Amino acid sequence: MFRSVLEAVSVWAIPLVVAGVPLYALTRKVKVYPVFVEGAKEGFQVAVRVIPPLVAVVVALGMLRASGAMDGLAALLAPLTSRIGIPASVLPMVLVRPLSGGAALGVVADVLRSEGSDSYAGRLASVMAGSTETTFYVLAVYFGAVGVSRYRQALPAALLADLAGFAASVVAVRFLFGP
Amino acid sequence: MSVIWVLLLVASVVVAAATGRMAALPGAIAESAGRAVSLSIGLVGILALWLGLMKVAEEAGLVRALGKLARPVLRRLFPSVPAESPAMGAMTMNIAANMLGLGNAATPFGIKAMEELERVNPDPGTATDAQALFCALNTASIQLIPASVIALRAAAGARQPADILGATLLASTCATVAAIASAWALRRLFRSSPAPGPPRV
């Protein structure tokens, strides 16, 4: 019930906003069409402004993954993390989630296939992927769009949030589904 | 960021040398650079649409109204942002879109919010406390429906693909709380060059 309501909301929200906002604006005597076009112009400029910082971040992360650093780190950490409830098959999620959304979903698909979707590992990978974001991408896009290059506490805070999300995923899956 | 970036680059080369994967690097570099551009260009359509709608909503007074609605919470989280700043409305829309899992719409609202926050930044180019917290919040986005994960689970034959909703909500709430707490706790460690005070003109 709760789920179908949520799903309906996520389907209806965008079409309703896209139609509803201009309709409301029209009743408030806004020149809807020219104003929309004026605002939309910015879209291209923003996307172009984001390119340079995104190139910097994506190239660095691409190199890191191609170098095998992730596999090495995973092999190094596996004995430790399996003790705190993160199976070796799920560990790549922790390492890859902040770097690439696509790769993270790849890990989920992998674990679901090899261990089953109703297994502890399958659920844990799903919850980890769903409860965090692609940190480096978000920071590069948001700060890149406004030309900020000194992130200050944003990066450590964002990574700590990821860590907290992963730890909470382990606790939540254990608590709700049993080990 | 400069140090972290160089660290990532150097570490990759060193590890690739150690693991004998140097041959994979040139391809990865070229492919990543290209992908960064297609990622950005891929944003153009959706950015244009939502920034256009946002402008319409702004002229109709909707953004201001939304900002006013969320003000009690936002004012506490972002004490340095003027209450009547359009950033309030944009941040509200960004957070709402994130919660509904509308990532496509959340990004343009978030960028708009960052632009408005940059407008009151006394030191352009360096993140303000508000910008840092807002970005950290976005990296820990609370999501009511992790749609792509549920789709994957359904495809993999899960008995109840969405049975992870509760655990996901719990975990992302923890991540959000951690983002707020650590952005707040760390803010003094990273100096923001000019002394806090009224914005320089």
Image (cartoon, coloured by chain):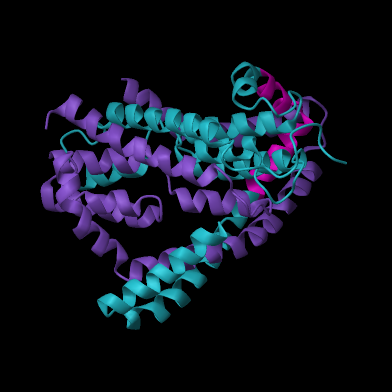
Between residues A125 and A87, which one lies in front from this camera angle? Answer: A87
- Residue at image point 62% right, 52% down: A150
Q: Position of residue A57 (x, y in %)?
A: 51, 62
Chain B shade in the render: cyan
B177 displayed left or right of B18: right
Classify the position of the C terminus of chain B by image quarter: top right
In the figure, the purple chain has which letter? A
* Residue A44 versus residue B120 in the image, above or below: below
Q: Is B58 one of the magenta-colored residues?
A: yes
At x 75%, y 27%, the residue is B82
* B83 displayed left or right of A98: right
User: Looking at the picture, how far across and down is residue B17, in whole percent?
Assistant: 32, 79
- Tell me: A92 left or right of B91: left
> Is residue A158 placed above or below A23 in the rendered structure?
below
Query: Residue B180 colored magenta?
Result: no
Q: Residue furthest top?
A: B72
| Among the 4 quarters of the image, the one containing residue A165 | top left
